[in-house]
Amino acid sequence: MTLNRPKPIVGVYEQPFWQYVRHREFRLQRCMNGHVRFPPGPRCPRCGSEESEWQKLSGRGRLCSWTVFHRQYFPEMPAPYIVVSAELEEGPLLIADFVGQQERLVTGLQLRLVFDECRSGDLDWVIYRWAPADPVA
């Protein structure tokens, strides 16, 4: 199924991130001192290091919070829809749409990233979203 979504604004620092997502790979910047960061940027906010690499991560996290949008902000996204904030196993918080039922949401729920095909006008791309790690629980 192809989703209709507004295409994210991609700057110079986000470009590699979205290229990896397009290939269904989840990578974030990790500085040479081992700090994983999101959003991407020119230097590590913890140690100031300008040296980093794009490291493949687990794509697993723990639900911290969520909200249900009842107002339609984008024509491509009819309300209601759920957006969650999850702490990655590797540390940073990552916000994304939630794939699943609102009744499943409880702080601490184990999540996994999934990738879905999207369309914005006549442009195809890939988005990441959070889903329950155990889809049958």
Image (cartoon, rainbow, N blue to C red):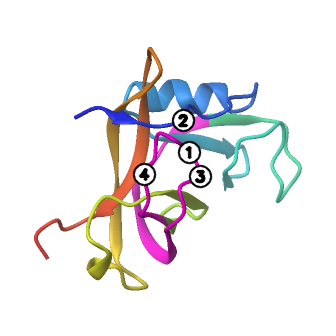
Disc 2 vs disc 1: Cβ atoms closer than 8 Å? yes
Which disc, if any, is residue 6? Answer: 2
Question: Percent from the top left, x then y, of residue 107?
Answer: 43, 85
Residue 63: in magenta span: yes
| Rendered position, 21 above or below 68 | above
Q: Residues within 10 Å of mark 2 (few under 14, many from 20)?
A: some
- Tell me the element at label 1: loop
| Residue beneath the point at 65% across and 25% down | 15
52 relative to 120 in the view: left or right: right
Q: Nearer the viewer, mark 2 or mark 4?
A: 4
Three-letter code, disc 1: Phe
- The quadrant in which residue 30 appears is top right
Q: Quadrant of the N terminus?
A: top left
Name the residue tied to disc 4.
78
Q: CA distance from mark 3 to mark 1?
A: 4 Å
Name the residue tied to disc 3.
73
The magenta span reads: 54-83
Q: Quadrant of the C terminus?
A: bottom left
Q: Nearer the viewer, residue 14 or 66?
A: 66
| Residue beneath the point at 34% across and 40% down | 115
Three-letter code, disc 2: Pro
| Rendered position, 68 above or below 46 | below
- The quadrant in which residue 40 appears is top right
Which disc, if any, is residue 93? Answer: none
Question: Earlier along the polypeptide chain: callout 4 or callout 3?
Answer: 3
Question: Earlier along the polypeptide chain: callout 2 or callout 1?
Answer: 2
Name the residue tied to disc 1.
74
- Tell me the element at label 2: loop
Residue 82: in magenta span: yes
